[in-house]
Amino acid sequence: QVRLVESGGGLVEAGGSLRLSCAASGSIFSINAMGWHRQAPGKQREWVAGISSGGSTRYTDSVKGRFTISRDNAKNTVYLQMNSLKPEDTAVYYCNQGPTVGVVSTGGGYWGRGTQVTVSS
């Protein structure tokens, strides 16, 4: 059974940084793509970033240049480094896992339960 557990969320001032982690178990982590999504109160879930098994990355336009997705296959963990945070980045952040970035970016695969990120102005 695949299990994904996010951590690293919290409260940060605008302009600050956070690094989210998502630890995976129950699957062959290295062959899967990973993704990060977020959902702000009253809004639909939004795809944020994805990374392929080979390390290729994609980002939604609103986070390009500020967020970096990376993976450590030895630790079965994917990260989301978030810099220059803005109040509009406030959301619950979720990671997911699937066979390709195309699958994870469209919401497929297995999901974690999320971690709250709050950016104060």
Image (cartoon, rainbow, N blue to C red):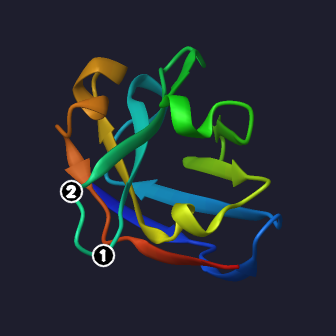
Expressed as whole percent of the image width and height from the top left, the position of residue 33 reads: 40, 28
Q: Mark 1 and mark 2 in contact (Cβ < 8 Å)?
A: no
Q: In the rendered view, tell whether residue 103 sits above or below residue 25.
A: above
Q: Which residue is mark 1?
A: 41
Expressed as whole percent of the image width and height from the top left, the position of residue 97 reads: 32, 41
Q: Quadrant of the C terminus?
A: bottom right
Residue occupying image coordinates x 23% and y 25%: 103
Please tell me which residue lies in front, 107 or 73. 107
Residue occupying image coordinates x 31% and y 53%: 26
Residue occupying image coordinates x 43% and y 54%: 24
- Mark 2 Cα-neighbour bin, 10 Å: few <14, some 14–19, many ≥20: few
Residue occupying image coordinates x 54% and y 38%: 62
**Amino acid tagged 2:** Gln
What is the residue that sits farthest to the front in this orientation? 121
Expressed as whole percent of the image width and height from the top left, the position of residue 13 reads: 77, 79
Please tell me which residue lies in front, 47 or 101. 47
Q: Quadrant of residue 106?
A: top left
In the shown orientation, is residue 30 left or right of residue 79? left
Q: Secondary structure at mark 2?
A: loop
Q: In the rendered view, tell whether residue 4 sits above or below residue 7.
A: above
Please tell me which residue lies in front, 41 or 52. 41
- Mark 1 Cα-neighbour bin, 10 Å: few <14, some 14–19, many ≥20: few
Q: Quadrant of the N terminus?
A: bottom left
How far is disc 2 from disc 1 in space, using C-alphas? 8 Å
- Numbered badge on residue 21: none
Q: Which residue is mark 2?
A: 44
Q: In the rendered view, tell whether residue 32 sits above or below residue 109.
A: above
Q: In the rendered view, tell whether residue 101 sits above or below residue 41.
A: above
Please tell me which residue lies in front, 4 or 86. 86
